Amino acid sequence: MTRPNEPVRPDIHQRITAAIIAQLEAGVHPWTQPWASAASVTRPLRHDGTPYSGVNIILLWAEAAHRGFTSATWMTFRQALALGAHVRKGEKGSTVVYANKLVRTETDDAGEETERQIPFLKAYTVFNVEQIDGLPEAYAPTLPVLVNPDASIAEIESFFANCRADIRHGGVGAFYAPSPDYVQMPPFESFHDAHGYYATLGHEMTHWTRHPSRLDRDFGRTRWGDANYAREELVAELGAAFLCADLGLALEPREDHAGYIGHWLQVLRDDKRFIVSAAAHAQRAVAWLHDLQPAPPD
């Protein structure tokens, strides 16, 4: 209940969406910023090394880029204390969220009781380890590990090959054709670098997961550029960002996606919940691609 003269706080979805809209209006893709730093490419990590998922990836990447953090690790105030450390006085935390469901029992007109699940988001605050003093040595910043680029590329080739998608090469456009179910890519040699090729392939492979035989993701798009087309493109954009982080690739904004920003802004203004939903769809798509990989040897 709001007390008299107490300002009404915007809900979590509105706060998240407003932050994303502000960055898009400034011409910034918040899911491509972190690689301006010297840190290696990775998802944000919890204090125990577990990667964050969904919309929290976007929120913490944006915070890291805006505030100049190079460490990928975050923790709560209490987690820092439990490690014998403390957040420096005056440091401002960053918001992350987790999804939960409220179960409510309702009685229908016939007197029958049914349970209804109501999803909601709850926010909490975390701090980057660069805002914390007294942490164990294991949390000290480390230099990125240099990887042989040929070995790295071979590993990524194997990742996409294990998905067993129909990937065709030729022409000048990159796209996923749903009805014949194939991914079309320009020749590898036409890209400026390997990272650009694999990032583009990750985007189209995220689209590939929408097929009815896979995740059956359908926003009801009818033509290029409509709102539902923009929804699917945003899912693919986020999926490519998450996948690139998992594969250690740098994701740069694609020039041919500049025109999408206006469509994404309209979608987010019309539906304050969609950025969270889009991140969840992207998370499921990337998890699907990971599940197609062979199990590591014992």
Image (cartoon, helix red, strand yellow):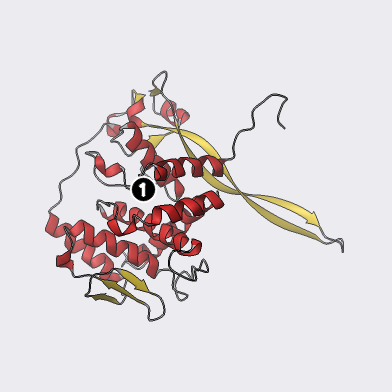
For this orientation, the residue located farthest to the bottom is 180
x 21%, y 56%: residue: 195
Q: Quadrant of residue 232?
A: bottom left
Question: Residue 265 location in percent, x, y?
Answer: 46, 50
The one nearer the camera, 281 or 117, is 281
Residue type pointed to by label 1: Trp
The one nearer the camera, 266 or 8, is 266
Question: Residue 9 location in percent, x, y?
Answer: 61, 33
Please state if 250 lies on the left or on the right of 123 as rendered: left
The one nearer the camera, 198 or 227, is 227
x 76%, y 53%: residue: 105
Please state if 194 lies on the left or on the right of 263 as rendered: left
x 51%, y 66%: residue: 219
For this orientation, the residue located farthest to the top is 89
Question: Could you tell me which quadrant the C terminus lies in?
Answer: bottom left
Q: Is residue 296 visible?
A: no
- The residue indicated by pointer 1 is 31
Question: Residue 11 location in percent, x, y?
Answer: 59, 40
Q: Is residue 93 visible?
A: yes
